[in-house]
């Protein structure tokens, strides 16, 4: 176990073949995701902020259910308010029970309105994440894993992101929210973003914070001789470049990839009275070595 986690006896480690992970019960948080590249172990997740799981305002590594995203909700007064990642009662703030078995590392939380069952599987060069949500009442669900990537410690500007988005869901600029709620209209992806995501050049100082559609082919993130291919049954991903710790001199330190359906306009309704109680999501992270591309 990494020395950074030596004072966290509640953390559960799981290692198989060339992969190892560390999970904390608060939010089923993936604290560390490491890969043996044939010469040494390399860390794939950002380690920039405090690793104190009780101080995780940015949702690093947690499972978010029932509904990820920043969206509008009605209030008892008939108005609207901003809800971020299902609010304080979401799985991101819950203590999961962690167990190891022949299947992998399982995290389970029994909430008042839903049960969330998460399975981290290590399969060869892949981490397969399976999220099962069982609803106890009618609800809209759209879960995700909120990971911040920094391959082998590389800043975001060194990473190449390769995929072919057809649609984008941009911020709607709602006045209630300083950060901006994503809108409700899917639009064609602008040519400048399509060109950036061809992967010919690093992301540089590009500022990303929108939802992009993903095909079954998924997307590929690469840096420092590491290629991480991400695929899912979600229809897209919220992708954003993140600055730690909100310091103009310390920008673009990590890239968040939140595999989810489009916030506000997509998701799946569950209703026990109609026999619809279960939603499942899978996300696969597959690794391989590649020749290290020169920075441009």
Image: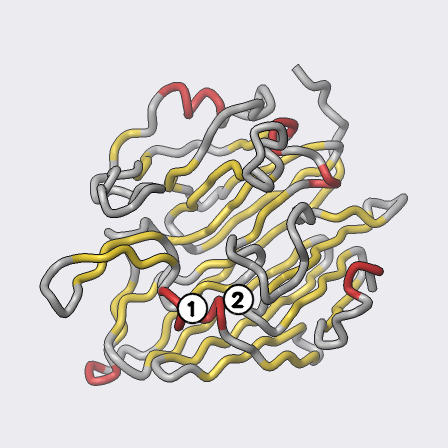
Q: Is residue 294 above or below residue 176?
A: above
State the image quarter where residue 296 is shown: top right
Q: Earlier in the sequence, mark 1 or mark 2?
A: 2
Q: How many marks?
A: 2
Q: Position of residue 18 (x, y in %)?
A: 80, 55
**SS assignment at label 1:** strand
Nearer to the camera, 12 or 83: 83
* Figure colour scheme: secondary structure
Q: Position of residue 240 (x, y in %)?
A: 47, 39
> In the drawing, what numbered circle is on residue 130?
2
Q: Position of residue 84 (x, y in %)?
A: 36, 57
> In the drawing, what numbered circle is on residue 280?
1
Q: Is residue 227 above or below residue 49?
A: above
Q: Position of residue 258 (x, y in %)?
A: 47, 50
Q: Are marks 1 and 2 in contact (CB under 8 Å)?
A: yes
Nearer to the camera, 54 or 110: 54
């Amino acid at each position: 176990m990494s020395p950074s986690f030596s004072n966290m006896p509640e953390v559960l480690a799981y290692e198989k073949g060339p992969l190892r992970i560390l999970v904390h019960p608060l939010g089923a948080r993936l604290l560390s995701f490491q890969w043996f590249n044939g010469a040494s172990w390399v860390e794939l997740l950002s380690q920039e902020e405090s690793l104190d799981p009780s101080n995780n305002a940015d949702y690093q590594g947690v499972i978010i259910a029932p509904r990820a995203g920043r969206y509008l909700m009605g209030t008892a007064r008939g108005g609207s308010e901003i809800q971020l990642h299902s609010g304080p009662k979401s799985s991101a703030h819950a203590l999961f029970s962690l167990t190891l078995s022949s299947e992998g590392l399982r995290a389970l939380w029994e909430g008042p309105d839903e049960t969330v069952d998460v399975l981290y599987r290590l399969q060869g060069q892949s981490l397969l994440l399976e999220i099962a949500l069982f609803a106890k009442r009618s609800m809209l669900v759209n879960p995700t894993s909120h990971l911040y990537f920094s391959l082998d410690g590389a800043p975001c500007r060194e990473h190449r992101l390769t995929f072919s988005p057809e649609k984008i869901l941009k911020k709607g600029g709602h006045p209630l929210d300083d950060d901006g709620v994503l809108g409700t209209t899917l639009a064609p992806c602008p040519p400048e973003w399509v060109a950036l995501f061809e992967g010919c050049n690093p992301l540089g100082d590009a500022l990303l914070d929108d939802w992009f559609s993903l095909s079954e082919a998924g997307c590929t993130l690469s840096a420092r001789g590491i290629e991480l291919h991400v695929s899912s049954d979600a229809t897209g991903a919220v992708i954003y470049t993140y600055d730690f710790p909100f310091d103009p001199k310390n920008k673009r330190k990590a890239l968040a990839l939140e595999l989810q359906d489009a916030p506000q306009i997509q998701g799946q309704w569950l209703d026990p009275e109609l026999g619809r109680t279960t939603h499942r999501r899978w996300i696969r992270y597959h690794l391989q070595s590649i020749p290290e591309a020169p920075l441009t």
